[in-house]
Image (tube, helix red, strand yellow):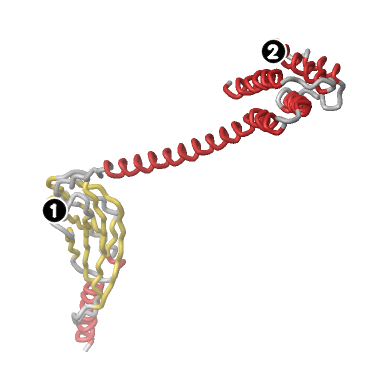
Amino acid sequence: MRKIFNAATIFSTIFFVILSASAHSGSIGISAEISNGAIAFEQKDTLVIQLTWEGEPSLYQIDNFPIPELDKFQILGSSSTILATPTDSASNLELTTRKFVYILEPTDYGTGVIHPLSLNATNTVTGEIQPLQTSQLMVEIAKPVPKEESDNTVLLIVIAVVMIIGIAVIAYFYIKRSKERDAEVRVEDRFYITSMGEIKKDTVADKKLFYSRTYRLLINYLEKELNLEVSSKTGEEIIAKVQELDDSEDKTSLIAWLELLQKEKYSPVSPSPGEVEELYQKIYRFFENKLSK
């Protein structure tokens, strides 16, 4: 009976060891896949390296995050995930899948190469190190699509036309305003010429009035145009002010006319029509010459 018990104990122990080993250990496999075997130069590709084993996620340890060697590609980004799902086998073991995902960007056209990736997987139960290697993958990368240089000719023409129109509009309003200002100046400058004509017409029958109004017009000219304060001054004081002018020709003419007008407007004798006409012509041409300058 004791022999039967010992035999049963040994058998149970062996069975437990086998069951325990099968519950923890399982073969590990590796694969590598590329999402597209041919891509445009402007396109991105995805490389997936997948490890699978039967057992819990902690059964195998990968020493380092694998970095694939690439030709005509560069890695834009990468990620790692691990997932365990129940299997349909009687052992009730989990199927563990670990993925390494890489986003690849072409750096040149032609045949892009993902070289075989080698890594070691360590079984955490047995301590066994299992070397793994992927197969080589190749991707055909098309030539870059030439970037069409935008034709800016039409845009430049439009901009030029708009600028020309804008300049023309500005010039139009500038010239218009200048003409308006010139017209305003001319109207102001013609005041003395117009006033001389009105004085002559209004004083046909009164030569004394011609001298009086012409005198007041010259006083106005001295104050408004030559900035001489003479309105409240005597005749002699006005002459003294005119003597201060720099223009000797104007100074001489104005002094002569002022003295004549002062004398004649108080003279008991009425001037002859010829004398009035001569003085009118001299003062009128004086103002006319000022307008043309």
Mark 2 element type: loop
Q: CA distance from mark 1 to mark 2?
A: 103 Å
Label 1 environment density (alpha carbons within 10 Å; few <14, some 14–19, many ≥20) = some
Label 1 vs label 2, nearer the camera: 2
Residue 13 rendering spot, x and y as whole percentages: 24, 78
Find residue 208 and name its label.
Answer: none
Disc 1 residue type? Leu
Name the one closer to the observer, 172 or 191: 191
- Name which quarter of the figure residue 209 lies in: top right
Residue 236 seen in this snapshot: yes
Residue at point 25%, 43% (across, down): 151
Residue 223 visible, this orientation:
no
Give the secondary structure at mark 1: strand
Q: Is residue 263 left or right of residue 178?
A: right
Q: Disc 2 marks which amino acid?
A: Asp
- Give me the disc on residue 247: 2
Q: Nearer the viewer, residue 283 or 112?
A: 283
Taking 212 as reference, is 62 left or right? Answer: left
| Sooner in the amino-acid sequence: mark 1 or mark 2 | 1
Residue beneath the point at 22% across and 60% down: 48
Identify the residue position indicated by label 1 in the image: 137
